[in-house]
Image: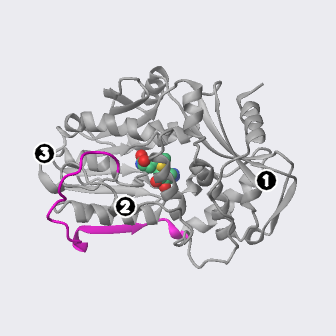
Amino acid sequence: MTHFDQAWQRLRSTGSPDCSSASPCPRQKRLFPETADLLDLPSRSALPRVRGGTETGYGGEAVAADPIGLFDSARLEIRNYHMTSYAEELARDIRAGLSSGQKQIPSKYFYDERGSRLFEEICRLPEYYPTRTEMAILEEHAGAIMEPFTAGDLVEMGSGANWKICRLLDAAAQPHGAGIRYVPLDVSESALQAAAEELIRMYGGLEVLGIVADFTRNLDRIPDDADRLITLFGGTIGNFTDAEAAELLEGVSALMRRGDRFLIGMDTVKDTDLLEAAYNDARGITAAFNKNVLNVVNRELCATFDLDLFDHVAFYNETSDQIEMHLAARQAMAVEIAALDMVVEFENGETIHTEISRKFSRERAIRIFEDAGLAPQRWFTDENGWFSLVELVRR
Ligand SMILES: C[S@@+](CC[C@H](N)C(=O)[O-])C[C@H]1O[C@@H](n2cnc3c(N)ncnc32)[C@H](O)[C@@H]1O
């Protein structure tokens, strides 16, 4: 019996916890508008403060905030390269993905405002070891990572919330982010805007240039007029197939110059039970996050997905060393997607594949770095070897 079968049977026998809700389809004027039905999550500013006078929202001891806490819009610029092409791209991806043999939706569509906040909530779950492990590695090694970087652009691909970058900013040689321009790049405009504004308030010397864009296509939007420390945290590289990851790493390698460094987070191969627990949390937050992608399709493309008729399924595929997330139809049904003039038929139990999260052995990681022309300089990990942060330079 495959892991999928086991997961499916388990799910069928227990039912799937879920705290999401289906939404009707008022055609929206803009993509990813504010949603009123967010879970009851703490606001970022209500989260605990940590070392260095910052509010990162994840762990750390409470100390006084930076006295330079005013919002100074002159230090913040956000460039949006995304919105014009995005509606067309979503329509194209959904049409292709839901017409294929194994139905699929690309995972980048998880991250509307609600999805981004659900992901933040996932990061706080006891079962979800990657965030706290990566944060602990950063906590221990931020000084060493920042030591060669005294000024320039601190670029964060797939930035989301600002927890991790705060660890680096707090360890910078100059206080309050002085001399540093933070360049977050994310598809989620709402998450990027909120995190950028918060950082401006927290670090009185920091400049922020936010780039709303897709890093699989828009890496050329990252400025190249300063030394750069480029980061890709959160195991995000694991959300790509081998071919896609190779293309992304080659793209980053191509834009790096001598002196630039690339810090990449990677989740590692480990015990199946531990992995599967991380993607099947008891509170059903991951289920809500997974199902939320159907809300996105309903809202943006006027579709009729009933979220209650889909189950969250996540299992570890040991053959390809990846967690797979699916949405499984509870019954045969037809779903209309009005904006695409399309009806999608589902058989009972048929799934939409929504995400992979690949886990890396050190050997495999080194191979894909080398293939992309990147060389590991330093390898930071935790005592269990559950997560790695690798510092890379161009070969
Ligand atoms: C797994 S989350 C990680 C968030 C954060 N960096 C962390 O470590 O907790 C992935 C982030 O990457 C963004 N993202 C996903 N695909 C993207 C793409 N193709 N281009 C730009 N951002 C993307 C999402 O919006 C989300 O903020």
What numbered label is drawn on residue 74?
Answer: none
Apparent side of residue 272 relative to residue 164 in the rendered image (left or right):
right
Closer to the observer: label 3 or label 1? 3
Q: Quadrant of residue 43?
A: bottom left
What numbered label is drawn on residue 44?
Answer: 2
Q: Residue at x 51, y 38 (%)?
A: 127
The C terminus: image quadrant: top left
From this view, report whether residue 136 is shown above or below residue 111.
above
Judged by its main secondary structure, the magenta piece is: loop
Residues shaded magenta: 58-84
* CA distance for labels 2 and 1: 39 Å
Is the residue marked by circle 3 packed among few (<14), some (14-19), or many (20+) residues within 10 Å? some
Q: Is residue 319 visible?
A: yes
The N terminus: image quadrant: top right
Closer to the observer: label 2 or label 1? 2
Front one among 64 and 227: 64
Apparent side of residue 49 relative to residue 295 in the rendered image (left or right):
left
Q: Which residue is mark 1?
A: 99
Q: Residue at x 44, y 28 (%)?
A: 386
Q: Which residue is mark 3?
A: 173
From this view, report whether residue 334 is shown above or below residue 232.
below
The residue under label 2 is which amino acid type? Arg
Front one among 248 and 294: 294
* CA distance for labels 3 and 1: 53 Å
